[in-house]
Image (spheres, rainbow, N blue to C red):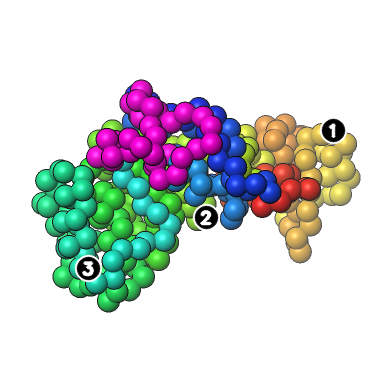
Amino acid sequence: MTILLKTESITKDFGEHKGAFDIDIELKSGEITGFIGPNGAGKTTTMLMIAGFIAPDSGVIKILESNITVQNIYNVMPKIGFLPGEISFDKNLTAKQIFKNNQSLLQIECSSKWMELSKYLDLNINKKFEELSLGNRKKVGIVNTLMHEPKILILDEPSSGLDPLIQQKLFKLLNDAKEKGSAILLSSHVLSQVQTICDNIIMIKNGNIVIKDTKENILNQSLKVFRIEKINSVYVEELEKNRKIEKWEQHSNEILLYTKDAEGVVKYLTSKEIYSFYIDKPNLEDTFLKEYEINNNNTQL
């Protein structure tokens, strides 16, 4: 896979521990990378730097091996599609006028594409922007971002404000772009969506990247949760003593065992002729909340 975009230690320091610091990211063709973290973690700042809308204080951004600056951003605009978290256009312009203006700015003939996308997303392109609902304004932003079929997509909370049907259509569009070789960076607080659609995960907190790996590796390294209806407390204590489990919880008639050594726990339980248990499938939300808790001491968002 080709690296389409790479950042090398880019930093934007707003003071008082706010900003994004020493960010190293690689976006490869045919991959979707989820960008997650709590509010104020530095996601939007990072995306604005990558998209060329704010200049980093230090570090380098490369698109197809070319260094990018605010001054030369117009040279690479046709290669980038950026969707901000909050969609804002001239309230008196229709969606059609917005798309025509963007087409002129990009100097790319793509009227057939924005008409196709508008129809697919059920967007009335003849309404003024101020007349559109929140969801339809988001559709305008999506069409404006995808209409020139850029190789790099930077999407800040792309599904917010969309109804479930349109969300599914959006994910189809993103998967289609991925199949055609685009590199996609997608931020979202809906971790179930990130887990479904993304190949890689980057987690940022307090302006610093704390996790960066493939989704598969992250989930494989996550704590596994065993749910058992009945078990002697002596067995739980022995598992804990032998460091087979990280912790355990009692929930009404159910005991939850948290472990990194699922195989070891299975062997132990079956050796005690305990077979009535099941293992939860690891999910990104559990991993995120655990990481947030670990890194939350003496920090400022």
Q: Quadrant of residue 168?
A: bottom left
Residue ID at (55%, 41%) = 12
Whether residue 260 is situated above or below residue 87 in the rendered picture: above
Q: Say which element carries label 2.
A: loop
Residue of label 1:
242
Whether residue 140 is situated above or below residue 43 in the rendered picture: below
Q: Which range is magenta? A: 50-78
Label 2 close to label 1 by CB (< 8 Å)? no
Whether residue 90 is situated above or below residue 187 in the rendered picture: below
Picture disc at residue 92:
none
Q: Nearer the viewer, residue 207 or 223?
A: 207
Residue ID at (43%, 52%) = 156
Q: Nearer the viewer, residue 82 or 105?
A: 105
Instruction: Name the spot of residue 36 as percent of width and height, x first.
Output: 54, 47
- Nearest-to-viewer mark from 2 and 1: 2
Picture disc at residue 93:
3
Q: Earlier in the sequence, mark 1 or mark 3?
A: 3
Q: Residues within 10 Å of mark 1 (few under 14, many from 20)?
A: few
